[in-house]
Amino acid sequence: MTIHRLEKIWIGMGLALLVVFLALVGVAAFAFGMHPPTGHALGVEPERATEVPPFDRPGLVRNADGSYDAYVVAFAFGYSPATLEIPAGATVHFHVTSTDVVHGFSIPGTNVNAMVVPGEVNHVVHTFDKPGTYLLICNEYCGAAHEMMAGTVVVR
Ligand code: CUA
């Protein structure tokens, strides 16, 4: 089999790029210390999340600028608090964590859709302009009662 000279050059460029990219990954990992989340954002084991601030008091906190922070704990198979009451027009910064397995945090009809990883705190922001009752659902399969895992966001 003969390989055309231009084809050899082309293969060589592909291999060179592969080496460059692998080297960049190595530099990022070892020289700059980049790595995936460690699972210790809370400073405690995931099952103890509700023992430490801010998740020892899940719920809404009003900020000085009129926005809200919502601290929500996901667990098999529900959310704490199960219902959040939000004034219409409010911007809510959701902070969510899980005490057991990976759950979802999704409010259909909004841009709220986050994965909730045990030991990590995920953050998503939404402004609720339209009053109504919104469903909060888990969209990550998390066990036998996954489809029952839901909460409510009431905007009034
Ligand atoms: Cu939690 Cu599915």
Image (spheres, rainbow, N blue to C red):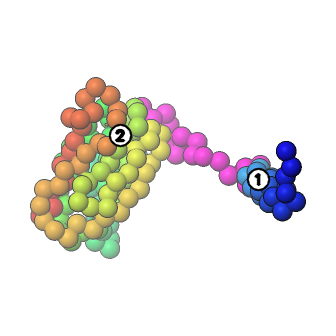
Specify whether tag 2 is near ligand 1 (CB below 8 Å).
yes
Specify whether tag 1 is near ligand 1 (CB below 8 Å).
no
Q: Which residue is mark 1?
A: 18
Looking at the image, which residue is at 73% across and 52% down? 25
Q: Residues within 10 Å of mark 2 (few under 14, many from 20)?
A: some
Quadrant in which residue 85 is drawn = bottom left
Position above or below: 63 against 97? below
Query: Can you name the residue that lies furthest to the bottom here?
Result: 65
What is the x, y in percent for residue 84? 20, 52
Is residue 6 within the magenta segment? no
Position above or below: 75 against 26? above
Q: The residue tagged with tag 2: helix, strand or loop?
A: loop
Looking at the image, which residue is at 32% across and 48% down? 105
Quadrant in which residue 118 is drawn = top left
Position above or below: 85 against 66? above
Residue 37 left/right relative to 79: right
Q: Are marks 1 and 2 in contact (CB under 8 Å)?
A: no
Quarter holding the C terminus is: bottom left
State how far apart marks 1 and 2 are (Cα): 34 Å
Residue 59 left/right relative to 37: left
Amino acid type of the residue that numbered disc 2 sits on in the rendered structure: Glu
Residue range highlighted in magenta: 27-49
Q: The residue tagged with tag 1: helix, strand or loop?
A: helix
Which of the pair 146/50 is nearer the observer? 146
Amino acid type of the residue that numbered disc 1 sits on in the rendered structure: Leu
Residue 155 left/right relative to 60: left
What is the x, y in percent for residue 117? 44, 41
Q: Earlier in the sequence, mark 1 or mark 2?
A: 1
What is the x, y in percent for residue 91? 29, 68
Is residue 131 at all visible to an observer of this figure?
Answer: yes
Q: Which residue is mark 2?
A: 140
What is the x, y in percent for residue 155? 15, 61
